[in-house]
Structure formats: C-alpha cells, structure tokens
Amino acid sequence: QKEVEQDPGPLSVPEGAIVSLNCTYSNSAFQYFMWYRQYSRKGPELLMYTYSSGNKEDGRFTAQVDKSSKYISLFIRDSQPSDSATYLCAMSDTGKLIFGQGTTLQVKP
Amino acid sequence: KAGVTQTPRYLIKTRGQQVTLSCSPISGHRSVSWYQQTPGQGLQFLFEYFSETQRNKGNFPGRFSGRQFSNSRSEMNVSTLELGDSALYLCASSLGDRVYNEQFFGPGTRLTVL
C-alpha cells in the first residue's frame, strides 16, 4: 500500500463546476500538506500549502486537511478550462515530499 | 528572478549506458531535490542535497547518485541504465533552511532508455 493514495481519474467537468480532489494517507507523522498543479510538459507548481489540520482559501481554491481521518481535499470553485491539468497532492514530515499519483482534470467549455 | 533550469531537456540512451543530468537552482537556494516521475509510479523522491551534502535519500538503488557543487548547482547520475529508468527527472530547489520550504520545480529532463 502506498503512503499517499490519490484517484488518478481522469475527471471531466463542465466549465463553472465545483471540483473536489482528494487524497488519503497512512503516515500520521505528516505535518505539511501541499497541492501542486502540473501542466503537460511542465514541472509541478505549488498551488496551496497547509500546515497541520484546517482550511485555507486562496481565490477560487480551498484546501482542507483532516489529520484525524488522514484525508486532504482541494476544492476548485467556478472551474475554468485553464484549470485543466494534473493535480498532485504532496505531504512531508522531514522536508522530503511524498506525492500522490495525481488526478487529471479536464474542464470543458 | 530566473527559475530552476535543467539540462538537457531530452535525452535518449541505450541500456547499460550511464547518464548525467544537471540542475541549476534559483539564485540563493541551497537545497536541491531530485524526483523521478513515471506514469506507473508517479512522482518519487530520489535524494536531496543541501550545502553540498546529501541530507535525505529515497528508496532507489545505488545506480542513482548525485552531487552538489559549491554554487548549489546539482547533478544526478544514473549508471547501467535499464529500460525502467525511462522517466521524467525533475529537480526542485528551495532555501532549505527550515523543515519545510516551498520547493520550486524545473521543467524536467525526459530520459528515454532504448
């Protein structure tokens, strides 16, 4: 079993939809939780970072961490075609990042 | 500020050969981490270098090695290449002065082993 599990999708939604992306993990030592976005032929770029449990909002993006359930989520409101990309969750306790498999999202106009 | 650069961007090698990939971090960043990305395994951590010393290591065989120079530039080497080494190799740089620092990724080197 992998330390971090993420449904690879693909996930296809119409423009304007609310998107929910999720990851579960097994290592209770993880304290730092991140969501990265990766466009085709590019390196990942950091979208959201959360320390420990709680919610964090940045524009159309909201990240949630529930350490008791070992579950993290990323919500995208009013999704746009430009949001079409692969979304990777990542976690860390020592600075080494452990990634989920990535979910491929397509937002159709 | 220039981002993380990786050279070369694409590489084709044959089984048994060795390869060296290069990464130039963002100016002022002292930590460089290397990752392997494949469709089957996703993004996996290889190792991290900070101030010329390996600080963290993932679960890869000894054929994968790296080093960091005094200017923070880093190289990774893969010896005796296998077909399964075909992947996108990403490096990421960060300040490296805390347990967590934001990591900035380069565009990657696409390695194909024939």
Image (spheres, coloured by chain):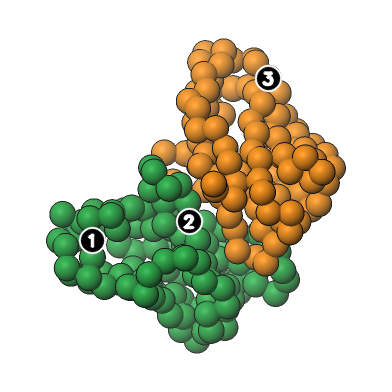
Chain colours: A orange, B green
Find numbered disc 2 in the image and state the secondary structure of the residue it sits on.
strand
For residue A18, the mark is 3
Asked if badges 1 and 2 are on one and the same chain, I answer: yes
Residue position for label 2: B44
Find numbered disc 1 in the image and state the secondary structure of the residue it sits on.
loop
Asked if residue B50 shows in the view, the reply is yes
Chain letter for the residue marked with disc 2 in the picture: B
Q: Amino acid at mark 3?
A: Ile
**With A109 as the anchor, is A63 left or right in this view?**
right
Residue position for label 1: B82
- For image coordinates 55% across by 66% down, the residue present is B93
Asked if badges 3 and 1 are on one and the same chain, I answer: no
Residue B81: x, y in percent?
A: 23, 65
The quadrant of the rendering that contains the N terminus of chain B is bottom right
Residue B58: x, y in percent?
A: 50, 66
Q: Residues within 10 Å of mark 1 (few under 14, many from 20)?
A: some
User: Going from the N terminus, do you reach mark 1 or mark 2 first?
Assistant: 2
Q: CA distance from mark 2 to mark 3?
A: 29 Å
- For image coordinates 18% across by 69% down, the residue present is B17
